[in-house]
Image (spheres, helix red, strand yellow):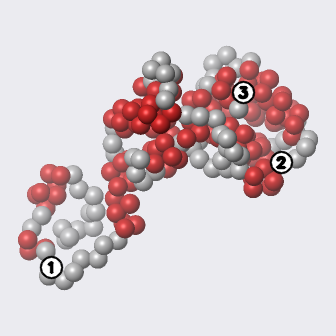
Protein backbone atom coordinates (compact mmCIF):
# COMPACT_ATOMS: atom_id res chain seq x y z
CA UNK A 1 0.00 0.00 0.00
CA UNK A 2 1.43 3.37 -1.00
CA UNK A 3 -0.37 5.14 1.83
CA UNK A 4 -2.89 6.67 -0.60
CA UNK A 5 -6.19 5.60 -2.08
CA UNK A 6 -4.61 5.03 -5.51
CA UNK A 7 -5.16 1.46 -6.72
CA UNK A 8 -3.96 1.59 -10.32
CA UNK A 9 -0.33 2.32 -11.12
CA UNK A 10 1.75 2.45 -14.25
CA UNK A 11 4.97 0.46 -14.01
CA UNK A 12 6.97 3.66 -13.40
CA UNK A 13 4.55 4.82 -10.70
CA UNK A 14 4.77 1.42 -9.02
CA UNK A 15 8.58 1.46 -9.06
CA UNK A 16 8.70 5.01 -7.69
CA UNK A 17 6.09 4.34 -4.99
CA UNK A 18 7.34 0.95 -3.78
CA UNK A 19 9.07 0.85 -0.42
CA UNK A 20 10.03 -2.07 1.81
CA UNK A 21 8.74 0.03 4.72
CA UNK A 22 5.22 -0.65 3.45
CA UNK A 23 5.72 -4.42 3.32
CA UNK A 24 4.09 -6.14 6.31
CA UNK A 25 4.86 -9.49 7.86
CA UNK A 26 1.23 -10.52 8.11
CA UNK A 27 -0.18 -12.69 5.34
CA UNK A 28 -1.69 -10.97 2.36
CA UNK A 29 -5.30 -11.63 1.49
CA UNK A 30 -5.83 -12.65 -2.13
CA UNK A 31 -9.11 -11.43 -3.61
CA UNK A 32 -9.87 -13.02 -7.01
CA UNK A 33 -12.66 -10.51 -7.69
CA UNK A 34 -10.30 -7.60 -7.09
CA UNK A 35 -7.82 -9.24 -9.48
CA UNK A 36 -10.53 -9.37 -12.15
CA UNK A 37 -11.32 -5.71 -11.50
CA UNK A 38 -7.65 -4.75 -11.93
CA UNK A 39 -7.48 -6.66 -15.20
CA UNK A 40 -10.67 -4.99 -16.41
CA UNK A 41 -9.24 -1.54 -15.63
CA UNK A 42 -6.01 -2.22 -17.47
CA UNK A 43 -7.92 -3.71 -20.41
CA UNK A 44 -9.99 -0.52 -20.70
CA UNK A 45 -6.89 1.66 -21.06
CA UNK A 46 -5.37 -0.54 -23.77
CA UNK A 47 -5.40 1.08 -27.21
CA UNK A 48 -8.27 -0.28 -29.28
CA UNK A 49 -6.08 -0.98 -32.30
CA UNK A 50 -3.69 -3.11 -30.20
CA UNK A 51 -6.55 -5.19 -28.78
CA UNK A 52 -8.04 -5.51 -32.27
CA UNK A 53 -4.72 -6.63 -33.67
CA UNK A 54 -4.46 -9.41 -31.08
CA UNK A 55 -8.13 -10.30 -31.58
CA UNK A 56 -7.62 -10.69 -35.33
CA UNK A 57 -5.60 -13.90 -35.01
CA UNK A 58 -8.03 -15.40 -32.49
CA UNK A 59 -11.03 -14.62 -34.72
CA UNK A 60 -9.28 -15.93 -37.81
CA UNK A 61 -8.37 -19.14 -35.99
CA UNK A 62 -11.78 -19.74 -34.37
CA UNK A 63 -13.97 -19.04 -37.40
CA UNK A 64 -11.64 -20.01 -40.27
CA UNK A 65 -12.56 -16.86 -42.16
CA UNK A 66 -11.12 -16.22 -45.59
CA UNK A 67 -8.29 -13.66 -45.48
CA UNK A 68 -10.52 -11.18 -47.37
CA UNK A 69 -13.45 -11.53 -44.95
CA UNK A 70 -14.67 -8.14 -43.73
CA UNK A 71 -14.94 -9.50 -40.17
CA UNK A 72 -11.16 -9.68 -39.84
CA UNK A 73 -10.54 -6.23 -41.31
CA UNK A 74 -8.95 -3.66 -39.02
CA UNK A 75 -11.99 -1.39 -39.34
CA UNK A 76 -14.44 -4.13 -38.29
CA UNK A 77 -12.28 -5.44 -35.44
CA UNK A 78 -11.55 -1.94 -34.08
CA UNK A 79 -15.28 -1.22 -33.90
CA UNK A 80 -16.01 -4.65 -32.40
CA UNK A 81 -13.45 -4.00 -29.67
CA UNK A 82 -14.96 -0.55 -29.03
CA UNK A 83 -18.36 -2.16 -28.52
CA UNK A 84 -17.08 -5.04 -26.36
CA UNK A 85 -14.28 -3.45 -24.35
CA UNK A 86 -16.44 -2.30 -21.42
CA UNK A 87 -18.23 -5.64 -21.20
CA UNK A 88 -15.28 -7.94 -20.59
CA UNK A 89 -12.77 -8.48 -17.80
CA UNK A 90 -10.28 -10.48 -19.84
CA UNK A 91 -9.11 -10.14 -23.41
CA UNK A 92 -9.97 -13.81 -23.95
CA UNK A 93 -13.66 -12.95 -23.39
CA UNK A 94 -13.89 -10.67 -26.42
CA UNK A 95 -14.88 -13.51 -28.77
CA UNK A 96 -16.99 -15.35 -26.21
CA UNK A 97 -19.07 -12.29 -25.25
CA UNK A 98 -19.22 -10.95 -28.80
CA UNK A 99 -19.62 -14.15 -30.81
CA UNK A 100 -22.77 -12.72 -32.42
CA UNK A 101 -20.61 -10.06 -34.07
CA UNK A 102 -18.81 -12.78 -36.03
CA UNK A 103 -21.54 -15.32 -36.72
CA UNK A 104 -25.32 -15.40 -36.81
CA UNK A 105 -26.92 -16.89 -33.71
CA UNK A 106 -27.83 -20.56 -33.71
CA UNK A 107 -30.11 -20.13 -30.68
CA UNK A 108 -32.33 -17.32 -29.45
CA UNK A 109 -33.10 -16.18 -25.89
CA UNK A 110 -36.43 -17.93 -25.40
CA UNK A 111 -37.16 -16.14 -22.12
CA UNK A 112 -37.13 -12.75 -23.85
CA UNK A 113 -39.18 -14.03 -26.78
CA UNK A 114 -41.78 -15.57 -24.44
CA UNK A 115 -42.01 -12.32 -22.48
CA UNK A 116 -41.97 -9.77 -25.32
CA UNK A 117 -43.38 -11.47 -28.42
CA UNK A 118 -46.89 -10.65 -29.63
CA UNK A 119 -48.29 -11.98 -32.92
CA UNK A 120 -49.16 -8.44 -34.06
CA UNK A 121 -45.42 -7.62 -34.12
CA UNK A 122 -44.94 -9.72 -37.27
CA UNK A 123 -46.11 -6.86 -39.48
CA UNK A 124 -43.90 -4.39 -37.59
CA UNK A 125 -40.75 -6.48 -38.09
CA UNK A 126 -41.60 -7.07 -41.76
CA UNK A 127 -42.01 -3.31 -42.27
CA UNK A 128 -38.83 -2.61 -40.31
CA UNK A 129 -36.88 -5.00 -42.54
CA UNK A 130 -38.21 -3.23 -45.64
CA UNK A 131 -37.47 0.19 -44.16
CA UNK A 132 -33.93 -0.77 -43.16
CA UNK A 133 -33.35 -1.98 -46.74
CA UNK A 134 -34.04 1.55 -47.99
CA UNK A 135 -31.51 3.24 -45.68
CA UNK A 136 -28.74 4.65 -47.88
CA UNK A 137 -26.02 5.02 -45.26
CA UNK A 138 -26.41 2.39 -42.58
CA UNK A 139 -25.24 4.67 -39.75
CA UNK A 140 -26.37 4.93 -36.13
CA UNK A 141 -28.56 8.00 -36.59
CA UNK A 142 -30.25 6.60 -39.72
CA UNK A 143 -30.84 3.19 -38.11
CA UNK A 144 -32.28 4.84 -35.00
CA UNK A 145 -34.55 7.14 -37.03
CA UNK A 146 -35.79 4.22 -39.15
CA UNK A 147 -36.63 2.10 -36.11
CA UNK A 148 -38.45 5.00 -34.42
CA UNK A 149 -40.35 6.00 -37.55
CA UNK A 150 -41.46 2.42 -38.23
CA UNK A 151 -42.51 1.97 -34.61
CA UNK A 152 -44.45 5.28 -34.68
CA UNK A 153 -46.24 4.25 -37.88
CA UNK A 154 -47.47 1.14 -36.07
CA UNK A 155 -48.18 3.04 -32.83
CA UNK A 156 -45.59 0.98 -30.99
CA UNK A 157 -43.20 2.39 -28.44
CA UNK A 158 -39.57 1.62 -29.38
CA UNK A 159 -38.99 0.18 -25.91
CA UNK A 160 -41.53 -2.55 -26.68
CA UNK A 161 -39.50 -3.93 -29.57
CA UNK A 162 -35.83 -3.10 -28.94
CA UNK A 163 -35.03 -6.16 -26.84
CA UNK A 164 -36.76 -8.43 -29.35
CA UNK A 165 -34.82 -6.79 -32.16
CA UNK A 166 -31.62 -7.45 -30.20
CA UNK A 167 -32.55 -11.12 -29.79
CA UNK A 168 -33.33 -11.47 -33.49
CA UNK A 169 -29.94 -10.04 -34.42
CA UNK A 170 -27.69 -11.43 -31.67
CA UNK A 171 -29.67 -14.29 -30.17
CA UNK A 172 -29.20 -12.71 -26.74
CA UNK A 173 -31.34 -10.48 -24.57
CA UNK A 174 -28.36 -8.32 -23.61
CA UNK A 175 -25.01 -7.31 -24.99
CA UNK A 176 -23.29 -4.48 -26.78
CA UNK A 177 -25.07 -1.33 -27.94
CA UNK A 178 -27.82 -2.50 -30.30
CA UNK A 179 -27.52 0.31 -32.83
CA UNK A 180 -23.73 0.08 -32.79
CA UNK A 181 -23.99 -3.65 -33.42
CA UNK A 182 -26.40 -3.11 -36.29
CA UNK A 183 -24.14 -0.50 -37.87
CA UNK A 184 -21.12 -2.80 -37.54
CA UNK A 185 -22.89 -5.82 -39.02
CA UNK A 186 -24.25 -3.81 -41.91
CA UNK A 187 -27.59 -3.67 -43.68
CA UNK A 188 -27.40 -7.03 -45.48
CA UNK A 189 -26.37 -9.01 -42.39
CA UNK A 190 -28.93 -7.32 -40.15
CA UNK A 191 -31.73 -8.04 -42.61
CA UNK A 192 -30.54 -11.61 -43.11
CA UNK A 193 -30.72 -12.22 -39.38
Q: Where is residue 190 in the image (x, y as percent from the top left)?
A: 68, 29
Q: In this view, does 35 lie to the left or right of 138?
A: left
- Pointer 2 with pointer 1, Cβ within 8 A: no
Please give the name of the residue rendered at 34% of the width and 59% of the height, measured from the top-left corner.
38
Q: In this view, does 56 lie to the left or right of 42?
A: right
Height in image: 133 above or below 81? above
Q: Is residue 114 left or right of residue 173?
A: right
Helix, strand or loop at disc 3? helix
Of labels 1 and 3, earlier in sequence is 1
Residue that badge 2 annotates: 117
Q: Position of residue 188 (x, y in %)?
A: 67, 22
Please give the name of the residue rendered at 56% of the width and 29% of the height, measured from the top-left corner.
184
**Label 3, residues with CA under 10 Å away: few <14, some 14-19, many ≥20:** some
Question: Residue 48 sits in which quadrant?
Answer: top left
Number of labels in the image equals 3
Please give the name of the residue rendered at 88% of the width and 47% of the height, measured from the top-left corner.
118
Cα distance, mark 2 to mark 1? 59 Å
Q: Where is residue 35 in the image (x, y as percent from the top left)?
A: 34, 63
Cα distance, mark 3 to mark 2? 19 Å
Which residue extends farthest bottom? 26
Instruction: Inspect this view and state whether residue 84 appears.
Output: no
Residue that badge 3 annotates: 191
Amino acid sequence: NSGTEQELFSMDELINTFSFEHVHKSGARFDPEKTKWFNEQYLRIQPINELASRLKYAVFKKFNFDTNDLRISDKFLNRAVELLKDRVQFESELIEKGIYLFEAPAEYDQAVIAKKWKPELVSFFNELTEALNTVDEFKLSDIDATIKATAASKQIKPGEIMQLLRVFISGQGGGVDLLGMMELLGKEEVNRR
